Image (spheres, rainbow, N blue to C red):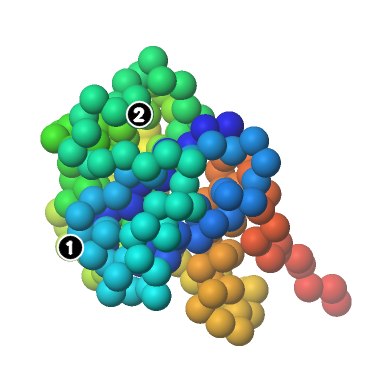
Amino acid sequence: MRLIIGMSGASGVIYGVRLLQALREQPGVETHLVATDAARLNISLETDLGFDEVKALADHCHSNKDISANIASGSFRTDGMIVAPCSIRALSAIAHCHSASLLSRAADVTLKECRRLVLVPRETPLHAGHCEIMLKAARNGAVLVPPMPAHYIRPQSVDELVDHHVGRILDLFGIDAQLVKRWKARQG
């Protein structure tokens, strides 16, 4: 399996980092990372990691300016792409097929090749324009998976919430990274 992980400039870079960490543990999964400049900045602001440490979690890392990278071509076969976090700016570029960066180009290629594109928008609150571009992206074939806490898991930490959400994202690709506390109906 080959997945592209995009990280854009919204808060919540931990979702992209945890995806890369979880996928690193999955045998037979090859990852391609593309991160915007704002994502690189947020990694230093929101985590104790440097970009080089995050980059090392991926099998391949591409410059967001490199439109000639293999992930920009439909002939380069992947199983899909996840953009986590997905800023409103990146979401807008993807929804409107504006391929000025590698991240938005790879996302556009993912959609045109009928592959799964999962977007993790982290903005809140949302105004009507944000909702409209989310709808447009969904109509183009993207799956929107905003990080919503699953309180039924009775989380004891933020890490548990992040892991659960990352596990649910990976579920969309048929990958069980053992991060999800599965729903169990109450007895009696």
Q: Which mark is residue 127?
A: 1
- Quadrant location of the C terminus? bottom right
User: Going 31% across and 39% down the picture, which residue do you hit?
Assistant: 62
Specify the amino acid type for callout 1: His
Circle nearer the N terminus (2, 1): 2
Kindly tell me whether residue 94 is visible in this rendering: no
Vertical comparison of 20 with 81: above or below? below
- Helix, strand or loop for disc 1: loop
The residue located at (84%, 73%) in the rendering is: 187
The residue lying furthest to the top in this view is 75
Residue 146, image x, y percentages = 39, 59
Q: Is residue 37 above or below residue 135?
A: below
In whole angstroms, how far apart are the C-alphas of marks 2 and 1? 32 Å
Where, by quadrant of the figure, is residue 87 drawn? bottom left
Q: Crowding near pointer 2: few (<14 within 10 Å), some, many (20+)?
A: many
Label number found at residue 71: 2
Which of the 4 image quarters holds residue 121? bottom left
Q: Residue at x 21, y 29 (%)?
A: 67
